[in-house]
């Protein structure tokens, strides 16, 4: 039985990855912050299953900004694979709290790399990097070789962390990999991200619980995929004979307007009757042309995004109903 350790286990990706790895017969260890909210709703169904929790799934308290706690967990668990998903993941918020974003996302990853370097037994690391490292890229779609040009504090933190993952791989020979992941969504997406915010609002307006939806830039375009495809990609990246970096993306761009069309269309409403734009939700600098070329992941891993964007937005809206 392989043993996996997941940071950020209570998040959208952490919860799907936990299910995926349990399905592959892994022993799964999740790291949770003692200070974080007790919202573990995404994993509740597993915690309440005595055949799983405490037998195949375990939780440990540790914190990326408290290295001793994390080191202790690493030495105790001795994971074969580490999936590093934790961090402050909201781009808009990173303009408000740049220092803690960088401390957690950039320095937190470096601290983890330092611990892995000291481990007596070898382990494999997957780091959840982001398309935001490209910011306003010189080419579109982007590949693993496109230069990093982040335009927000979150992107800078991820660029630092992703490059450190490469440094530790090349300088110290560690099995450390980046998944350069484009946006990926699901009914478990956090409520502040635009897909979930829209799907939730469409359902609430339809049911008379909300009067309007206030958004930022509705012409913004992104490469939106399905989180369940992405966690499969994370695992595939760590099963390769050699450590490497891979873009995980659909290769197709949609706009916020497309999400509005699909979500409000699902509940039989015209979004323009209910949506208002407000500078409050506009970002001081907006990333652009973020479309990923997943060709390497397909050629080397056999990975591709299987879910369709249209089905995903409909599913997310119906889940809110
Ligand atoms: P993003 O996701 O910043 O791409 O980062 P988000 O859903 O927040 O924004 C997507 C696009 O929608 C525009 N937008 C709004 N966004 C939010 N959150 N709220 C609004 O009201 C709104 N109106 C318009 C944004 O400006 C943007 O263009 C996500 C995160 O998961 C990161 O952690 C991850 O690294 C990247 O995707 C890839």
Image (cartoon, grey):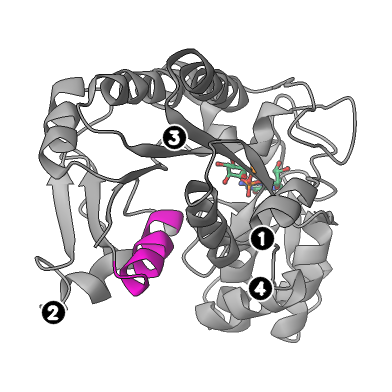
Q: Residue at x 42, y 43 (%)?
A: 85
Whether tag 1 and tag 3 are in contact, CB under 8 A, the answer is no
Examine the residues drawn in magenta and state their main secondary structure: helix
Q: Is residue 75 left or right of residue 94?
A: left
- Say which label, 4 or 2, has the lower sequence index: 2
Q: CA distance from mark 3 to mark 4?
A: 24 Å
Of the residues tagged 4 and 1, which is closer to the observer? 1
Mark 4 = which residue? 312
Determine the CA span between mark 4 and mark 1: 18 Å
Q: Which of the labelled discs sits on residue 175, or is there none? A: none
Nearer to us in this view, 230 or 171: 171
Looking at the image, is mark 4 or mark 1 earlier in the sequence?
A: 1
Q: Is residue 273 above or below residue 167?
A: below
Distance between mark 1 and mark 3 Cα atoms: 27 Å
* Image quadrant assignment for residue 103: top left
Of callouts 2 and 1, the N-terminal one: 2
Q: Residue 17: where, in percent of width, then height?
A: 41, 60
**Place of residue 25 in the rendered image (x, y in percent of width and height, measured from the top left):** 29, 70
Is label 4 or label 2 in front? 2
Residue 94 is situated, as x and y percent measured from the top left of the image, at 53, 27
Distance from label 4 to label 2 (Cα)? 31 Å
Query: Is residue 222 at all visible to an observer of this figure?
Result: no
The magenta stretch is 13-25
Q: Earlier in the sequence, mark 2 or mark 3?
A: 2
Dot 4: within a 10 Å radius of its alpha carbon, few (fewer than 14), some, or many (20 or more) residues? many
Which residue was labeled with disc 3? 88
Residue at disc 3, secondary structure: loop
Identify the residue under disc 1: 303
Q: Which residue position is annotated with label 2? A: 51
């Amino acid at each position: 039985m392989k043993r996996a350790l997941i940071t950020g286990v209570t998040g959208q990706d952490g919860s799907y990855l936990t299910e995926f790895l349990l399905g592959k017969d892994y022993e799964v260890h999740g790291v949770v912050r003692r200070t974080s909210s007790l919202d573990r709703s995404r994993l509740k169904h597993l915690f309440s299953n005595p055949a799983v929790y405490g037998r195949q799934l375990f939780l440990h308290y540790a914190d990326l900004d408290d290295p001793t706690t994390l080191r202790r967990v690493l030495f105790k668990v001795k994971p074969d694979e580490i999936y590093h998903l934790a961090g402050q993941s909201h781009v808009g918020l990173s303009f408000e709290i740049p220092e803690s974003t960088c401390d957690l996302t950039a320095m937190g990853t470096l601290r983890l790399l330092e611990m892995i370097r000291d481990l007596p037994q070898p382990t494999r690391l997957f780091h959840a990097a982001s398309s935001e490292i490209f910011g306003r890229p010189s080419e579109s779609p982007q590949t693993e070789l496109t230069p990093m040009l982040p335009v927000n504090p979150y992107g800078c933190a991820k660029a630092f962390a992703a490059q450190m993952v490469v440094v530790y791989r090349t300088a110290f020979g560690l099995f450390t990999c980046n998944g350069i992941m484009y946006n990926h969504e699901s009914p478990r997406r956090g409520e502040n991200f635009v897909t979930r915010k829209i799907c939730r609002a469409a359902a609430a307006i339809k049911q008379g619980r909300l009067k309007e939806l206030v958004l930022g830039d509705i012409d913004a375009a992104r490469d939106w995929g399905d989180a369940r495809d992405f966690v499969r990609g994370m695992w595939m990246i760590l099963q390769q004979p050699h450590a490497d970096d891979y873009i995980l993306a659909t290769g197709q761009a949609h706009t916020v307007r497309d999400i509005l069309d699909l979500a409000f269309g699902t509940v039989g409403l015209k979004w323009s009757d209910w949506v208002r734009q407000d500078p409050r939700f506009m970002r001081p600098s907006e990333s652009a042309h973020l479309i990923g070329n997943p060709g390497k992941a397909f050629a080397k891993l056999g990975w591709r995004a299987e879910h369709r964007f249209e089905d995903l937005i409909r599913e997310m809206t119906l889940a809110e109903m």
